[in-house]
Image (cartoon, rainbow, N blue to C red):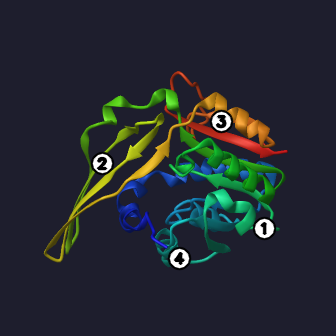
Amino acid sequence: MNDEFSLEARFYDETWGKYDYDADMKFLNDLFQKKGCKTIIDIGCGTGNHFIRLSKLGYEVTGVDISQAMLGIARKKKKEGKIRFIQGDMRRLGIILRGEKFDAAICLGMVFSNLEQYRHVQAFLSGLRQILRKNGLFIFNTRNAKKINEDLLNRLILERLLVKERLQLLLFFYNTRHPRNRNVIIWRPVYLMKENGKVDLQIREHKLRWHNFSILRRMLIESKFEVKATYSGNAIEEFNEEEHANMWFVTMAK
């Protein structure tokens, strides 16, 4: 099967992976400790920057990702702890993890935005509800459709310059709105590489959805998740739909 994230996987930790994961860990660990969570599933785990840290804190972690390339890098980074890797589509959790139960689930970064259509969100929530214990936590973040940054659309923008011994990389992006859904952004990373003297240009394309807060909250409730809190990030500032671009949900399976 073609891995549409293979190139992103190769450069992830040196580009987008510079995020402050330790701040997320404090936020998550506080919640998990209060609820006595021990088994965690990291949905869209990528190269493992969240779940490896969770494992070091003593949690038993399962990482799920659709990309074998991402999981391959995560496996190389694994040093210790109870970690399991599963390749699979987040919309099929109830099938690929049938019969299993977890104390908590996380879905962080831009992962939830890959659920481009609401039928995909429904399929994901349905499967997730099957594998979470009653009162299990589900913590995720996504982008607010009311706060799409127009300055980042329809322009070629330099994201990162990477220089290594045999590799030079210029990473650009060129984002546009989807012609049939203004809340879906077509993210196009553009890779201009010179590796071992050979020049290569590759353009990838991924559809990412910015979500409507009210609709998403209603879908969670209809899928038997109680919304316990919404924040603008991991700093515990209450989410305001008119002000914040990012929204973090803390929910509990009923």
Q: Mark 4 points at which residue?
A: 75
Q: Do the residues labelled 3 and 1 touch (CB within 8 Å)?
A: no
Q: Residue at x 63, y 59 (%)?
A: 90
Quadrant in the rendering for residue 44: bottom right
Q: How far apart are marks 4 and 3 (CA)?
A: 33 Å
Classed neighbour count for the residue bearing mark 2: other residues with Cα under 10 Å, few (<14), some (14–19), many (≥20): many
Judge by depth and name the residue closer to the eye, 199 or 233: 199
- On the rendered image, what quadrant is the C terminus found in? top right
Of the image marks 4 and 3, the number of the one nearer the N terminus: 4
Q: Measuring from the top left, give residue 130's x and y in whole percent.
A: 80, 57
Q: Distance between the residues labelled 4 and 1?
A: 23 Å
Judge by depth and name the residue closer to the eye, 13 or 94: 94
Would you place residue 241 above or below residue 37 in this image?
above
Q: How many labels does the image show?
A: 4
Q: Distance between the residues labelled 2 and 3?
A: 27 Å
Q: Mark 2 points at which residue?
A: 173
Q: How far apart are marks 1 and 2 (CA)?
A: 38 Å
Quadrant in the rendering for residue 214: top right
Q: Are marks 2 and 4 in contact (CB under 8 Å)?
A: no
Q: Mark 3 points at which residue?
A: 216
Residue type beneath disc 2? Phe
Of the image marks 4 and 1, the number of the one nearer the N terminus: 4
Residue type beneath disc 1? Arg
Q: Mark 4 or 1, which is nearer the eye?
A: 1
Q: Mark 1 points at which residue?
A: 98
